[in-house]
Amino acid sequence: MQKPTAPRFPEALLRERVDARLAEAGASAESRAAAVKAMLHASLVGVDSHGVRLTGHYCRMLEGGRLNRQPDIKVDRRGAGSAMVDGDDGLGHYAAYKAVEMGMELAREAGIGAVGVKNSSHLGAAGAYALAGAEQGFVTFATTNTDSMVALFDGAQKFHGTNPLAFAAPVPGTRPWLLDMATSSIPLNRVLLHRSLDSELPEGVAATPEGVPTTDPHVADMLLPLGGVDYGYKGAALAGVATLFSALLTGTTLDPDFIPMYGTDDISTPRNMGHFVLVIDPDKFAGRAAFGAAITQYLFSLRTSPARPGGRVMAPGDREWAEMEERRANGIPVDPDSAAFLGL
Amino acid sequence: MQKPTAPRFPEALLRERVDARLAEAGASAESRAAAVKAMLHASLVGVDSHGVRLTGHYCRMLEGGRLNRQPDIKVDRRGAGSAMVDGDDGLGHYAAYKAVEMGMELAREAGIGAVGVKNSSHLGAAGAYALAGAEQGFVTFATTNTDSMVALFDGAQKFHGTNPLAFAAPVPGTRPWLLDMATSSIPLNRVLLHRSLDSELPEGVAATPEGVPTTDPHVADMLLPLGGVDYGYKGAALAGVATLFSALLTGTTLDPDFIPMYGTDDISTPRNMGHFVLVIDPDKFAGRAAFGAAITQYLFSLRTSPARPGGRVMAPGDREWAEMEERRANGIPVDPDSAAFLGL
């Protein structure tokens, strides 16, 4: 999404500046550490919409009172494999990383840890939390519901958010298998980009306010679920899975009921967003060694599978890890407004 | 998929005949009960490909020795929230229902039960097992990997199976929310139907042996993952999620390595198929009452959401439950070959 000509900055400088701005806005050291980690993950793997550009937004919400600057997170263990985390209305990244930590603690004994999060807020890229578990050797699932902007299948109203499903799995000796997918085909900022470039959208990814599929970015008002005009009932149901875990099991806000993330005067009322993580210890199933051998064989078989003419076969995460290498070498592109906010 | 003119038969008669044929093929009472239950679920909700028409196939596999007629299922509790089920090479339905039972037992205490299955075989429709948990009040996920027939994104080879993801959730006073989706856009039998009718396929659902997308059912050789030509990397990764849970965590057969379900002379070697179920007790999160109120509100909001011109908004499962009502009233259509095998 980033224009290729955007100026680039080193990771360490961005970490320092994001942290400094959040500190000025009053965020506690713990919540800053979590937010910086998650935002830099997104910026490094190329998900700029959830990266350092959100610093200004989070600062405004900390200053407005929507976000608690000094959250006191509470973890309520509900069973040998289950817990609820109360984010105390702080930065969602902090609550979500806490949920993964609790999930790992539960999984080490029970084999699996299922942790719901309530009284949270925007967590950035869900993949950051799946990754946090995988980096410690656990198969991890993370999801959240978000502000309505995707039509139902055959619907004429924004209903679900782009509700991500993120999975990650450890791979011996190399970076994790990582999937972080919106349950719409494209994110909203893709529509905005096409609008600014006056270029047609692909078929089946967006609709007019009446729910009629359109490729005109200027009349596109909402996204369509993954699967498009014919199979979008699958994407809509997967968005429902995110809501089922994140909101229905945790007792938090439904997608259409959120105070909007942007474009509202109310920046003082907490949004009570929910998330959910599942953390699985491979040692309690076929065993860690067998799992490691199997996923290595699976990925070898996948990556050496023939491609169609002009195509390239990749495993989930391969594109992200390549992007991370490139950005670590050449810097992370930052749009002018965000660069100015960060004093770059 | 069933021709509308196929003769129809009452559910009770089909149950009796399927059970009788499986008994003649030597299947134990327990494995028959499970297979009949799962097959009738599929036949009632309209998934005919996984319904009573498989009776003949299962009987041949029981007689050939691929399937153990008298399996002795072993359940190995691995942690407070985790277990492995050894299906002893019997009918997959039996092992999968056992996994759900064990999952519920674990979830009642731990909040969640994660159960892997090994040494199993074809389980029919994965939704049957998600439903079995939901009918007892648990949010349930069931998945399996299957024989390769779907290309990777940009791939030119059958790699994953149609690997289903099935989720179900209890809804107070009414039937469960139910999603049972293949991670391809369409099933293989849709291609076969278009071939027999000489009618074009939709765009982006199938490919030639070289991996080139095609709408010609006569040259279509493999399926494309959900998301089609542009976003199929999401469907391919979701198929990978099914393999991750079902095969990698359980140490069972990878999709490309299965002895084929059909079209092989080897009907005596077990296939060591794996499955995975997750069973969650809402009482260990926001609580059963809060969950029931939330899902009721969510579904009301979803079903009353406006439709686009000519469209109709439905919740996952609505189509299936309507089909079940219709088939209970008017009988279940059965193709001539299957009807003959069942002595109808």
Image (cartoon, coloured by chain):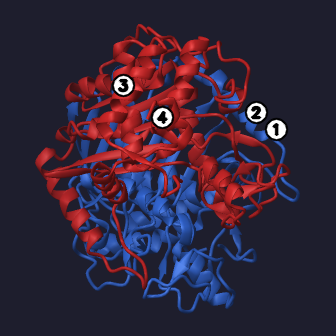
Chain colours: A blue, B red
Residue at 20% in and 25% down: B109
At label 2, the amino acid type is: Phe
Q: CA distance from mark 1 to mark 2?
A: 6 Å
Q: CA distance from mark 4 to mark 1?
A: 31 Å
Q: Are dots 4 and 1 in contact, CB under 8 Å?
A: no
* Disc sitting over residue A176 in the figure: none
In the figure, residue A135 lies in which quadrant?
top right
Tell me, yes or no, whether dots 3 and 4 are on the same chain. yes
At label 4, the amino acid type is: Gly
Q: CA distance from mark 2 to mark 4?
A: 29 Å
Question: Is A103 left or right of B86, judged from the image as shown?
Answer: left
> Neighbour class for label 3 at 10 Å: few (<14), some, many (≥20)?
some
Quick one: SS at disc 2? helix
* Residue at numbered disc 4: B124
Tell which of A300 and A14 is nearer to you. A300
Tell which of A135 and A296 is nearer to you. A296
Establish if A154 lies above or below B61.
below
The chain carrying label 4 is B
At label 3, the amino acid type is: Ala
Residue at 26% in and 28% down: B104
Q: Are dots 1 and 2 in contact, CB under 8 Å?
A: yes
The chain carrying label 1 is A
* Residue at numbered disc 2: A300
> Neighbour class for label 1 at 10 Å: few (<14), some, many (≥20)?
few
Quick one: SS at disc 3? helix
Establish if A62 lies above or below B244.
below
* Disc sitting over residue B34 in the figure: 3
Tell me, yes or no, whether dots 3 and 2 are on the same chain. no
Establish if A85 lies above or below B120.
below
Q: Are dots 3 and 4 in contact, CB under 8 Å?
A: no
